[in-house]
Image (tube, rainbow, N blue to C red):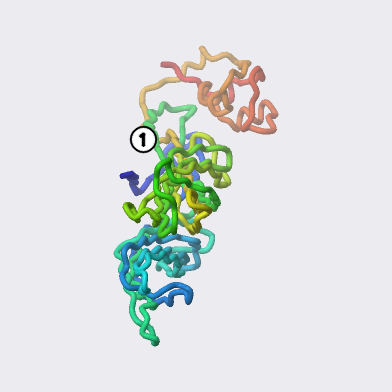
Amino acid sequence: MDLGCRVEELFDLELASDIRGLSDIQILREPCKMKQVVSYNKDQYNINEQMVMLPEKPAVQKILKTDFKAILKEDKITDGKVELSGVLSINMLYVAMDEMNSINFHEFELPFSQYIEVPAAERNMDCVTEISPGQFYIDAVENEEGEKKLLTIEAVIYVNTKVYKDTEEEAVADAYSPSNGLEIGKEMVKMNEFVGKGRANTVIKESISIRHGDPEIENVCYVNAVPVINETKIFDDKVMVEGVLETDAIYMSSFSGEPMCSLVEQIPFKHFVEIPGLKLGMQCIAKCNIESLNFSPMNSQMIEIRVVISVAADAYKQTEKKLVNRVEEVEGIAVDQSRIPAVTIYLVQKDDTLWSIAKRYNTTVDALVKLNNIENPSKVTTGMQIMILKNVRAGKSK
C-alpha cells in the first residue's frame, strides 16, 4: 500500500505598506509577488450512463471484476466557473454467455464534462484541479434481442479545485530617519507561490514473459497496470518523473491442473514534463494515471502490452522576506555636529547598496544620487567611491 499525504494551510497575510508620523522618514519598499487563492472548492458529480458493448464482444453472463479510473484531460477557467473535461476508464472482466462460458475482457471509456461555479474566477487566472473516483456500480442488462450487452453505469467523481490570481503588493522592508532614532521590528514572512502546472503523456510498449516452469499462455483474459512514482527530479523549466509500471496479467493455460494463471511484472519508465518557470530548489507534486491499456499474446510465453501514461505535475516555490511589522521613535538622541567630518569618501564594499550606505551615514538615497551623479541607483559596484557631505546628513551620537 502506498500512502501519500499533503497538508496545506490557507491564511490571510497582512503587510505594512507605509509608515507615517515623521517628515523625513525614509522607507524601503519591496515588491511581493504572490499567487493569491481566490477560491477553494470541493464538489462531487454523479454520472449515470448506459453504453452498448461492441458487436464482436459476447454477451455478459456474470461480471467478475471491474476497474474504474477517473482521468482529468483538461481544466480551464472561464468567467465565473472552472470547466472540466475527462474520461471514465473502465475495465471489465466477465463470464461470457456462450457454450464454453469463456472469460472475456472489455475495456471502454466514458467521456464527461462538468463545471464548478466560482463567481470570482476570471479567464486570466490559474487553477489546480484534482479528481478522484468514488462509488462505482456497473450492471449488464438485456437489449432488444434479449442479450445482456447494455451496460448501466453509475459513478461518483470527487473534485477539488483551487483558483489563483497573480498579485503584487509593495511591503515595507526597512525604514530609518536621518534626524530621529527609530526602533524597527521585523518578522520573517514565508509564502508558497504556485509557479505553474504541466501535463504530458508517455507511451510504454513492452512485452512480459512467463517464468520458467509456468504454464504456457493459451488466452489472455485481463491485464491491469498501476504506475508508481519512485522519484522526481527538478530541472530548469521541466521535471523528470521516474517510476515503475506494475502490471498484473491473468491468462488461461492449456494445463488442466492450473487452468488460470497470473503474471506479475514491473516495467520501469521515465518521462519529462515541461513547466515554464520551474527552477532548482522549488517543489513539485507529480501524479500518474493510466489513460489507455492494450494487450495481446505474442506467443505461448509472452504478452505484449501498450500503455499510455498521463503525467501531471504542479510546481511551487517558497519565498522568504524579512518585512517591517513595528516602528517606534526613540527619544533622547542628540546629534553632535562637531564630530562629523565635512566630507566623507566611502568605498563601496561587497553587498552594499545605496540604501544601506545612506542609512549608515544618516543621509538619503536621493542626496547621494544627486551629489555623485549616479545614473542607476539600484546598481553600485564594489570599489566605487561615494562622496557624502556634512550638509546632506545629520549624524547621530550614541
The residue at which mark 1 appears reads as: 326
The image position of residue 266, as x and y in percent, is 44, 43
**Which of 396/157 is in front?**
157
Q: Is residue 102 above or below residue 148?
A: above
Looking at the image, can residue 41 be seen? no
For label 1, the SS is: strand
- Where is 192 relative to 91, above or below? above
Q: Residue furthest front?
A: 256
Q: In the picture, which quadrant includes the C terminus?
A: top left
Q: Position of residue 38 (x, y in %)?
A: 41, 57
Q: Which residue is nearer to you in this view: 106 or 353? A: 106
Residue 240 or residue 165, whichever sits in front = 240
Q: Quadrant of the N terminus?
A: top left
Amino acid type at image mark 1: Arg
Q: Is residue 326 left or right of residue 218?
A: left
Give coordinates of residue 54: x percent, y percent: 47, 74
Q: Residue at x 49, y 63 (%)?
A: 77
Which residue is at 34% across, 75% downward? 140
Residue 230 vs residue 192, the one in the foreground: 230
Residue 15: percent from left, percent from top: 41, 43
Query: Where is residue 163, by image quadrant?
Result: bottom left
